[in-house]
Image (cartoon, grey):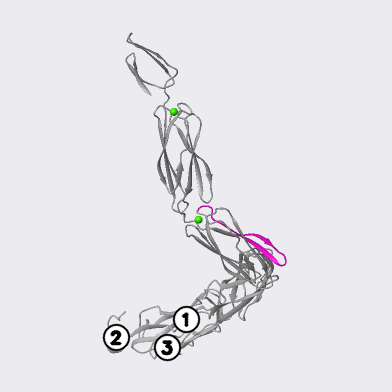
Amino acid sequence: MSYVSVLGETRVVCRLLAITLILGTVSVQTVYGQGCPATSPAVAVTAVITGPPTQIQITAQDTDDGLKSIVVTTSTNATTVVPAFTVGTTSPVVVTATAISQIAGSTVTLTVTDLCGNVTTRDFQFGGCTTTPPAVALTAVITGPPMQIQITAQDTDDGLKSIVVAASTNATTVVPPFTVGTTSPVVVPATTIDQNAVSFVTLTVTDLCGNVTTRDFQFGGPPVITKSFGSTSIQANGSTSLSFNITNPNATPLTGVGFTDTLPAGLIVSTPNGLTGSCDGGTNTASAGSNSISLSGATLAASSSCTFSVNVTGTTAGVKNNSVTVFSTNGGTGNTSSASLTVLPPLPPTIVKAFADSQVQLFGPNSSTALSFTLTNPNAATTLTSVGFTDTLPAGLIVSTPNGLTGSCGGGTITAIAGSNNISLSGATRAAGASCTFSVNVTGIAIGVQTNTTSTLTSNEAPPGAPATASIFVDASFFLWFFHEGGGGGRPPL
Ligand SMILES: [Ca+2]
Ligand SMILES: [Ca+2]
């Protein structure tokens, strides 16, 4: 290019302009074609040949001014060649970078200049290790017999390095030759798979960056069942879930999958049965109140599982051991899974007793007070029957005359004979969570603190419940006033 001063201006004039100098006249005659455009050359990747080894084509073009130079400023882990071209060409020029390293990564930088001095610099990065392992999948099953399969391994980013048959049991597995570094799929056939035995093919596939995928493919094996209770223990007559998970470990479907689970004594299907989940195409049977849960006729797709659960209720206390065996039509009988549930006995009834007053007089108008008993069945689901207790009064208390009995307790018989030292309840029935209260008047007959403790609480269903204790003070001040201080001569004590 050249710089020419015309009419006080400095202009960049391209070579396409005709410039004529007429010497001696000190005049400049300039003919302009057009101004020099400021548009820089275009530089882009236009082709990738994956190889291996990978090759790249980078195309440079300047459609207005024409190319002046293409300089390779960086070429790391690559061989970059600029072809010969005519300076000023407006046609594309294709630069080829070969031997690109997919593992280490390659960098190619081009600096492209056009005839007007416009410059484009572009960096191109290729390859470099990824952390993505190869994909390994079953892509074809020829049922035979004998059965054949195809397993496809591919690594689209780094390229495959090796495919190793880690196991081939009851099958013939051959890895075909392939170009190390290929990003194309490689199909590994396994032939003569024995469907009547459990057959395994295990491939370990590594890419050029050391990422590894190991995949097991199983054929002909039975289903696998796992059962579990939702809780490890429940109260008597309480409920929990019982879940069944069935897995098909094979790379092919299982048909006719089922089981029958007979519950142990003291464990039944709840009402309602709370059935949730299903197994594809199978029939679940779990009749409320029965001792049997079953599945029949289910189909499990390759490498799939299904889960369903029902609620069960413990009707007697104890450890309930429960086993179930799964079977299938085409994979035979599978494992036996066991689970245990502890059914705890019902909680015993509870009792609270209390005197209405903290003290009574030994003699006179304030010598009696009410003694109340409150019984509770703390169970959530168990009715307690034949609930009873005995309360023998201490030497300083007797049942008042009359006994002042109020309240009742679940149809039970309350005995409190006037003048006796005994209060008792027998034969009461209390529903889950229910309480009852009754009271009897008692009279102090000896001075001092009278501590009163019941027997344990008995019932037909639960272990004995803890006794209840309460105390009252029998005071002698009224007695002393009445008999020793003048027989009513003064004001009696309260
Ligand atoms: Ca240009
Ligand atoms: Ca990879």
Point out the stretch of residues depicted in magenta: 138-157
Residue type at tag 1: Gly
In the rendered image, residue 238, in percent from the top left (x then y), is placed at 56, 74
Residue type at tag 2: Trp
Q: Residue at x 36, y 20 (%)?
A: 11
* Closer to the camera in the image, 88 or 302: 88
Residue under label 1, please give it: 404
In the rendered image, residue 337, in percent from the top left (x then y), is placed at 59, 76
Question: Residue 327 shows which numbered tag?
Answer: none
- Residue positioned most to the top: 25
Question: Residue 393 shows which numbered tag?
Answer: 3
Q: Is mark 1 within 8 Å of ligand 2?
A: no
Secondary structure of the magenta portion, mostly? Answer: strand
Q: Residue at x 43, y 25 (%)?
A: 37
CB under 8 Å between callouts 2 and 3? no
In this picture, residue 413 sits left or right of residue 72: right
In the rendered image, residue 474, in percent from the top left (x then y), is placed at 34, 85
Q: Residue at x 42, y 20 (%)?
A: 35
Residue under label 2, please give it: 481
- One can see residue 282 in this view: no
Alpha carbon distance from label 2 to label 3: 27 Å
CA neighbours of label 3 inside 10 A, class few (<14), some (14 to 19), many (20+):
some
Does the magenta run of residues contain 146?
yes
Alpha carbon distance from label 2 to label 1: 28 Å
Which of marks 1 and 3 precedes in the sequence?
3
Does the magenta run of residues contain 13?
no
For residue 413, above or below residue 10? below
Label 1: which secondary element: loop
* Closer to the camera in the image, 478 or 378: 378
For residue 181, above or below residue 286? above
Which of marks 3 and 2 precedes in the sequence?
3
